[in-house]
Structures are given as C-alpha cells and as structure tokens.
Image: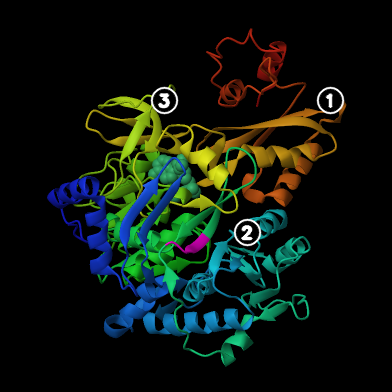
Amino acid sequence: MGTYHIKDKHSYTQNYKTSIEDPETFWGTIAKDNFSWKRPWNRVLDWDFSTPKVSWFEGAQLNITENCIDRHLDGNGDKTAILFEPNDPNAASEAISYKELHKRVNKFANILKSKGIQKGDRVCVYLPMIPELAISILACARIGAIHSVVFAGFSATALASRINDCDCKMLITSDGGYRGAKTIDLKSIADEALLECSGIESVLVVKRLHSEIPMVKDRDFWLQPLLEDASELCDAEVMDAEDPLFILYTSGSTGQPKGMVHTTAGYMVYAAYSFKNIFQYEPDDIYWCTADIGWITGHSYIVYGPLLNGATTVMFEGVPSYPDYGRFWSIVEKHKVTQFYTAPTAIRALAKEGLEVVEPYDISSLKIIGTVGEPINEEAWHWYNDHIGKRKCPIVDTWWQTETGGIMISPIPNSFEGKPTFATLPFVGVIPALMDENGIELKGNSVEGRLCIKFPWPSMARTIWGNHQRYKETYFSAYDNMYFTGDGALRDENGHYRITGRVDDVIIVSGHNLGTAPIEDAINEHPAVAESAIVGYPHHIKGSALYGYVTLKNANNSSEALKAEINQLISKQIGPIAKLNKIQFTTGLPKTRSGKIMRRILRKIASKDTSNLGDISTLLNPEVVEMIMENSQ
Ligand code: WTA
C-alpha cells in the first residue's frame, strides 16, 4: 500500500520500500485513492525495456482536466487556481479561481472544436507566460488534442521545424508579449514560421500587446471575440490511460530536437504525487515556480502537478531583473509565497546583485525552496540557503528531465535533509543505477558513473514522436534493460546522489538544454565557414556558456563583423538562447585519424584547463592544437 502524503523519514522509507518491492500495488493504491477515473485499469504496469514498451494503468479511462479542475469545484471552486503576476509591477495581478478556470478552459476547448480540432490532433502553442498559455493546454487536454508547447524564445525556423515534425493542425499564439522592458513580436515570428508549415489550418491569436498586426484571412482568428460566443460547458473527452497528453521537444546530442511523448494516466499520477511530497504542499500554500511553461518544469510543476492537488500556482510573465533585481522577492512578499522553485542560473544572477535587492522584502512566508535544471554549485546553494531560505527552509535540489516527466531524485523535506550540491535520494518508485564505461553496474557507495534508471516509473516518456527507433537508441541501447539519462553522477558514502553533468554533447546554458549539432549546422550555413565545433565552458552565471571554434574557408575573412553574423544566424535558426559567448577562428580542428573532431581537447582549451590534454600525438593534425591554444580566448 502507499500513502499519498509522505510525512517523515519513516513514511518515506516505508513508501519507497513498497514502491520497489510491489510497484503495482503501490501505484495502484495511490492512483485509485486520489484521482477520478471513468473506468478502472486492467493492469497497473506492463513493460519491456528492450522493445522498449511501457504502459501504466492500461485499460483505464479518464480525463486529466477533470482531475485538475472539475473535482475541486465542489469544495474549492472559489479558491485561486492560477495567480497571474504580470510583467508590469504596477498592473493588477489576476486571481483565477477553479470555477473561473473551468469556464475558461471549456470555452477555449469549444473554440478548438469549432475550428475542427479533434481527439489526437496536434496543436502547437507558442505563447508568452500569460494565463491563456495554461488555459490553452488544458483546453487541448479537455478534448483529447495533443499539445506541443514551443518556448516563446525560439526562432521562426525552430518553431516551424517543431510544428512540422508532429504535423500540427493549429497554432495558438499572441500579438506579442512583454519581457521586462522589451516586447516580443510573436505573431510576426509565427507568420514567418508558417510560410514553411502547410499543415496549419488555423491560428488563434491572443491579444496581449494590443498592437496592430497583420491577420491572414480565413486562417488567423482573434481569440477574444470567439470566446464571447463560446459555451462554458464542454464535456471532457474520454481518454485511455496511454493516450498521448502532450509532446515536448528537447535537444539531443545529435540531430534535430526530439519530440518526447507523454501519456495521460501515468504522467498525471506521478506529477501529482511528486508535487505533493517534494513541495510538501498544504491547502493554504501559495506555490510559485519561476520556470516558463515552454519547458517541462512548467508543464509538470506550474500547471499539472499543482492543479491536480487543488493548489494555488503563481504564473509570472516577466523576468527577474525587471524593473530591478528585487522583483522575485517583491512577488514573494506580495503573494506570501510559501514554496519557491527556480533555477541555479537565476540564483547566481540574483546573488551577484548583492543583498540590497533582497533585504527590503519580507520573504518570511517561504517554507521550502527548490532548484532545477542544472547542477547547483556550492556557493549558490549556500547563498540561497542563507539569504532566501534564511537557514530554515529545506532546499529541494530536484534532478529530472523532459523525458522523465517528473522529479526523480530530490530531498523530501521533513524526511531527510538536503546536502549542498546533492540531489540526494531517489523519489518513491525510482531505482537509479551507476554504470561504468564497460557497462558494469557500480554497486555500493562512494562510486561515480553514468546515471541510469533500472525500472519504469509512471511519468516516463513513452516514445519520440514519429521515431521510436531513435527513442530506443538514445535511451535504451547504451546499457541492457536500463534507461540511460545522459548524465553522470556520484553516490557518496551515505548513498546520496550528486549529479555531475551531461556526459554527451548536450550543453546546459542558463538551464536550457542545447544540442551542439543544430548550432554547428546553423554556423556551417554561413558561406564563409568551412566547419565548426561547439563546446561548453564554465560560466559564473550561466553555469555553462558556448564556445565556438570556427574554421573559415578563407582565413583572411576573420573579423568581428563575421562573429556577429554567425551569432545572428544562430539566433535565426534556433533562438537567441543558443548564441555563442566566444568565437575563435581556427585554421583547423583537431581530429582523430578517422576524422572525428576531438571535442575533449577543445573543451579543455575553452575551460582553460590545458595542463593535461592527454596524448595528442595520435591525432591526424596535432599541430593545430598548439595554434588553437595560442589564440584561445
Ligand atoms: C540537468 C529539466 C543537476 C541534467 C527538468 C538533466 C540537473 C537535464 C538538475 C534535463 C539538477 C536537471 N542537478 N542537473 N537538480 N536538474 N538537470 O530536460 O543534466 O530541460 O539531464 O529538464 O538538466 O533538462 P530538461
């Protein structure tokens, strides 16, 4: 049996033990006792990592929005579901109750239907952090359409490739968005993308900036007038447990982004249960996660996890630096936030501004503070603990991935303590393993290796949209019968895990995963460029930053202007988040005799760690290493 609330160390130990020894009974009990189902399952779990195939609660039927909204209406209909804090600190915040959310989701769902969207259709959502972003994905889920949210910082090219990859029929966007002192013109980016997307039949446009924008006749529709006529009632579509709920793209080490597919029931159960326990959510809490809903953190821990628990979830439109670096803490004070969840890169950026921007605010409402997205360094952890948590709030350093759907390794406040830079212990149901390079599992404590997961958990992604073979190769082929995370980790003498970082060519810049291959492809499109290689190097705020080695067809063309052109090209193909911090023009790149670029050496040079470059004599062109070192930045 399992208990929904993990209250203390004993209950963590008990729940963990049952979840491992008898996962079907454990998750079956949690699922049955805490959610509403239209039909029970035939079998809790069916799995085979070699195919790979995983299904949870097969045969069950449900709709996740009834669990997120409808079932709270009777007792908690007037409670605030979404607390929207706009970019402009002088504009009013908006409290959307569960009742109001119900109406708005239903209306939106009816509009989707009226535009021909049916169960199973894909709908792309490209919106800033405004309530319609949460409402539109819930509206999709209400009618069984599969949402694919694309972060509003991505470029037209990146948006188009994501729309086409999963054949979206509709795009939901806005006339623009506010981001600090700037505005972003989303509709014109969307229009440019749509030149490449023949599958899009209609575009719903939310008014946010009230700016004049071109609308394409019979394709583009303003949302507001449609809402006025839409009915507030919309029956929730009956969904099978394993019907896809959403697709979310994440970078791979090679090739194009992968459309991770999450399904309905298992995702729901795990997102809800992990939210409840890792944030120790209580009914009067005001919970705030600063992520964007364009990323998995926003899906699971701004929208689904909190709403499934009937919580109040804060949604913030702006940025931490606007109108000044005190903004986060002013919001914590204003709404008496109890749980605050952010990224190490934000903590470092705020710590740099000094305590003058923290001290004016009363942040004593905080009970638990969290981080996600990349390893948190010791200094940032202590600053967060001392100055934000005031040494009384447990820090939950939560390790997980787009692919895992929910938090996998994290402290559980009240059950055991965190330790600086350690994600600590696996969450209930999670069985981690560390593997050495020969595929042997490292048993016991005080070991370091590649992090794998040995057993299915309910919210794992089931496939890559349209490419199950790639799913198998990326996650289930490195080691037999294990899910490979792509991360390295160590297990200390007490069995606590510390994530050491990616072991593949994914670089995490300010918490955003970036694959090197698409960036290199973008650079190589420049007519002056012969070839390029991107590596990450340590950066005091971003965690990692990008260093590009670029070989030109004609070395005489190197110039600052060309560097700017290269970054523009990257911005256009991917988005400004993928711009390079440093660019070094090279006469060649170090290669193995089989022609493979030796990134290990380039990484060391970029990190200014050249004391031990290893044996370079076996390279095809050892002489370039010296030249690259001389000119490094
Ligand atoms: C990294 C974000 C260390 C890791 C939820 C992982 C972390 C990748 C942590 C997934 C953490 C995430 N400590 N590293 N607490 N959390 N990561 O898909 O490398 O955007 O594989 O999901 O971020 O990033 P993604």
Residue situated in front as seen by the camera: 590 or 165:
165
Q: Which residue is mark 2?
A: 166
Q: Position of residue 184 (x, y in %)?
A: 66, 64
Position of 328 with respect to 156 (left or right) is left
Tell me if label 1 and label 3 are in contact, CB under 8 Å: no
The answer for how far apart the CA atoms under marks 2 and 3 are is 34 Å
Residue numbers of the magenta segment: 242-246
The answer for how far apart the CA atoms under marks 1 and 3 are is 44 Å
- Residue 540 in sight from this viewpoint: yes
Q: Which residue is mark 1?
A: 555
Q: In the image, is residue 2 above or below residue 255?
A: below
Residue type pointed to by label 1:
Ala
Ligand 1 within 8 Å of disc 2? The answer is no
Badge 3, how many Cα within 10 Å: few under 14, some, many 20+? few
Ligand 1 within 8 Å of disc 3? The answer is no
Q: Secondary structure at mark 2?
A: loop
Residue situated in front as seen by the camera: 455 or 200:
455
Ligand 1 positioned in quadrant: top left
Q: Which of the 4 image quadrants contains residue 202? A: bottom right
Position of 102 with respect to 88 (left or right) is left
Q: Earlier in the sequence, mark 1 or mark 2?
A: 2
Residue situated in front as seen by the camera: 483 or 556:
483
Badge 1, how many Cα within 10 Å: few under 14, some, many 20+? few
Q: Position of residue 175 (x, y in %)?
A: 67, 73
Q: Which residue is mark 3?
A: 439
Question: Is residue 255 covered in magenta?
Answer: no
Q: Position of residue 81 (x, y in %)?
A: 38, 75
Q: Earlier in the sequence, mark 2 or mark 3?
A: 2
Residue type pointed to by label 2:
Cys
- Residue 349 in sight from this viewpoint: no
- Quadrant (top left, top right, bottom left, bottom right) of the C terminus: top right
